[in-house]
Image (cartoon, grey):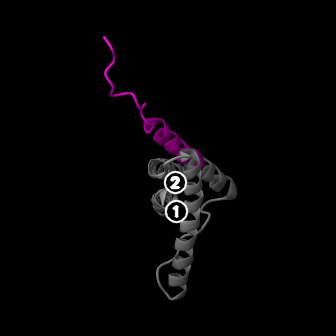
Amino acid sequence: MAVGWGGLIAAVGLLIAAERGSTVRIAALVVAFALGGFLAGVRAEELRLLHAAVAAVAAYAFYGLFVLIGHLVDFLSGPASPSFMPGDNGEWGIAAAAALVAAMAGGFVASVRLRPGRRDQHRRRPA
């Protein structure tokens, strides 16, 4: 469940950034993947960084399905579909690496912010 939510949010970022310039694409991916990684970390009970990383991979799988559906619509005389890897390979690789780092950063923030409190935190201390 955690991976699904985080991956879906990040995939929406991939859709938004698909046909933009490289700077805008990387900025949009960093924001979307950081949010997706954070949400995956929030939903996970443990191994939050792993959930964030898998959510980043799931985002590309969701995006691949969206592109496949877009190609089907394009084949049936609809609007043009986005490409799976916009830009050249180096630019795409930089964007994918930045997205993965952002997802991990989001998962790390969730991990740090959601640490369980100590059990005796609410007990009165002897004076």
Residue at numbered disc 1: 18
* Label 2 secondary element: helix
- The kind of residue on which mark 1 rests is Ala
Question: Could you say where residue 54 lies in the image, as x and y percent from the top left?
Answer: 59, 55
Quick one: label 2, few (<14), some, or many (20+) residues within 10 Å? many
Q: Nearer the viewer, residue 83 or 110?
A: 110
Q: Please tell me whether residue 80 is drawn above or below residue 46 in the rendered image.
A: below
Could you tell whether 69 is left or right of 91 in the image? left
* Label 1 secondary element: loop
- The kind of residue on which mark 2 rests is Arg
Question: Could you say where residue 41 lies in the image, as x and y percent from the top left?
Answer: 49, 48
Residue at numbered disc 2: 25
Decide: marks 2, 1 in contact (CB < 8 A)? yes
Q: Residue furthest top?
A: 127
- Report the residue at 52% width, 72% height from top: 66
Q: Nearer the viewer, residue 112 or 62?
A: 112
Q: Residue furthest right?
A: 89
Q: Can you tell which quarter of the image residue 67 is in? A: bottom right
Q: Please tell me whether residue 41 is drawn above or below residue 3 in the rendered image.
A: above
- Report the residue at 52% width, 40% height from top: 108
Question: Could you say where residue 127 lies in the image, as x and y percent from the top left?
Answer: 30, 10
- Report the residue at 56% width, 45% height from top: 49
Question: Could you say where residue 47 lies in the image, as x and y percent from the top left?
Answer: 56, 46
Estimate the spatial distance between the alpha carbons at disc 2 and disc 1, rounded to whole Å.
7 Å
Q: Please tell me whether residue 103 is drawn above or below residue 70 in the rendered image.
A: above
Q: Earlier in the sequence, mark 2 or mark 1?
A: 1
Magenta-tinted stretch: 100-127
Quick one: label 1, few (<14), some, or many (20+) residues within 10 Å? many
